Image (spheres, coloured by chain):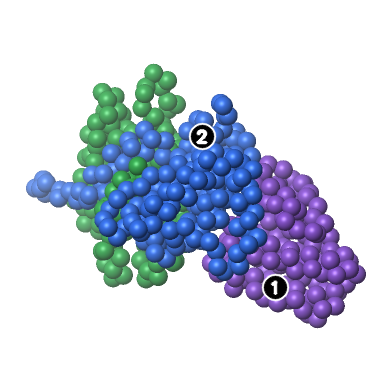
Chain colours: A green, B blue, C purple
Amino acid sequence: MTYSYYKNMQINNIIFVYQGEVTADLVSSILQMIENKLEGEGEDKKVKKRVFNVMVECLQNVYHHLDALPPTDPSNPVKDKTALLMIGREEKDYFIITGNHVLNDRIPELKARLDRINRATKEELKQLYQEVLTGGQFTEKGTAGLGMIDIARKSGQKLGYDFHPVNDKYSFFSLEARVSRIPDKG
Amino acid sequence: MASSEVELVHSPALQYAYPLYRNMLDNSIVFMYHGPITPDIVVDVLGIVEERLEGTGEHRRISKKLFNIMVESFSLTDEMSAGDTILMVRQLPYLYSVSIGRRIRTASVHEVRSYLDAVNVMTPEQVRAEYHRLLNDAMPNMPLMVGGLPAISILDLARKCNGYLHYSFEYLDDEYSFLGLEARIYKIKKC
Amino acid sequence: MQALRIESTHKTPRVILDPENGIFEFSGRSIPEDALGFYKPIFEWLDEYAKSPLPVTHVKFDLEYFNTSSSKNILEILKRLEAIHTNGHEVRVTWYYDEDDEDMEETGQDYQALLNLPIELSVKIQS
């Protein structure tokens, strides 16, 4: 068993992956590890900062999303309070992938938001951020609305995403942020 | 603005996210780390495990054991295995486990397997005695090695988990194989 | 003779060796990259101390966790203390362990079994 996981992590350039409940303390422990790892890799200072900041946003985003969920319906076999956190490094980019369950009826809205974010230029993203901040077009309670915009802004790249159907109520939503290892980019 | 299809970046890792999540969930894997294992990583990973155990009502005894096993399991990696190491922690309602996966020379597989089998049939007293012997005998900088692994670390792990060291070998080629070693801590003793 | 003081890091223990009052202390964690490199100066210091030790030396071990390469080096420390004790200069060792840390307690028992040195096992008071 160990070998197949090792192989998959190697092929996909994954450094670290966590599955389970996400608490504030866990987030800070993971960030501590990443910070030290970046330090050890001798990455450029700017890159280090950027990667770290995007990571913070991604982890906060999933943490707040999970936190805002209603208590798990006991009849639901899906553990909607658990999440996936994945960090990896490729030749040109670091990537951070977060995954969590979402209600199927939220998907169209999420997709629309993500596509809008991905279509936007740097300036447009800034405007979008202000809009949401002042409770404009995207009426979203709490920080979850700003989260993804912030991630896109900080990473400087498009957000990757995937919705994997689980059952008629839930799907698994994976979000990917990529951060360039080249100092001048992004 | 014309609604052009947003070019979606679907990296391999993103494609793998859900399958990985399911595999981890279904096999009770809490986290995995792939890369060189340094004392810094040890400390940081322990920090993560600590958070995981916090507020679970776990007996402090178990969390201490888990810690100590993790500390020692890192001694099983070295420069040779450096980039090709995986650390895995599993958490079930009735057990915790720490697994280390690393490359070893195919030529050493038989030696390592024999040693693990020998340790696994020892009684706790025998393990202790052998551990004392190794602790006392060799010079600190010339430890007894079994196929590239420090024998004393293997014994220490066997002692700490009071049971068997579960292992698996994967033949890769004539030069290298992959060793997976798992130390389990059972929360409830059934037999 | 100068006292030896090494501040702790997140991988190496705090070490205080005071020849004036004969109080030695090892506390914290021990998972150094280069175990021998860390412990060698301590061995050398103890060899020097052994030439004219105090009538009574108190040694305290209060470790959170350590790996087996550290265990071996700690044994080397204890062997030097044992020699001092056997030569007529009393050495009293207290091995502290967390109440819930069976492994630390067992390690203390290992050292008791392996050496002719008074090693007292003592439960740490929870803070």
Residue in view at x 10 percent, y 48 percent? B4
- Label 2 SS: strand
- Label 1 SS: helix
Q: Is A168 located above or below residue A147 in the figure?
A: above
Q: Residue lying farthest top?
A: A75
| Residue where numbered disc 2 is placed | B95
Q: Tag 2, which chain?
A: B
Horizontal and vertical percent position of residue A167: 27, 25
Horizontal and vertical percent position of residue C13: 66, 63
The image quarter in which residue C25 lies: bottom right
Q: CA distance from mark 1 to mark 2?
A: 41 Å
- Residue C45 left/right relative to A179: right
- Marks 1/2 same chain: no
Residue in view at x 81 percent, y 81 percent? C1
Horizontal and vertical percent position of residue A24: 50, 44
Residue A4 in view here: yes
Q: Is A70 located above or below residue B8 in the figure?
A: above
Q: Is B10 located above or below residue B79 in the figure?
A: above
Mark 2 neighbour density, 10 Å: few (under 14) some (14–19) many (20 or more) = few
Marks 1 and 2: CB-CB under 8 Å?
A: no
Mark 1 neighbour density, 10 Å: few (under 14) some (14–19) many (20 or more) = some
Residue C43 badge: 1
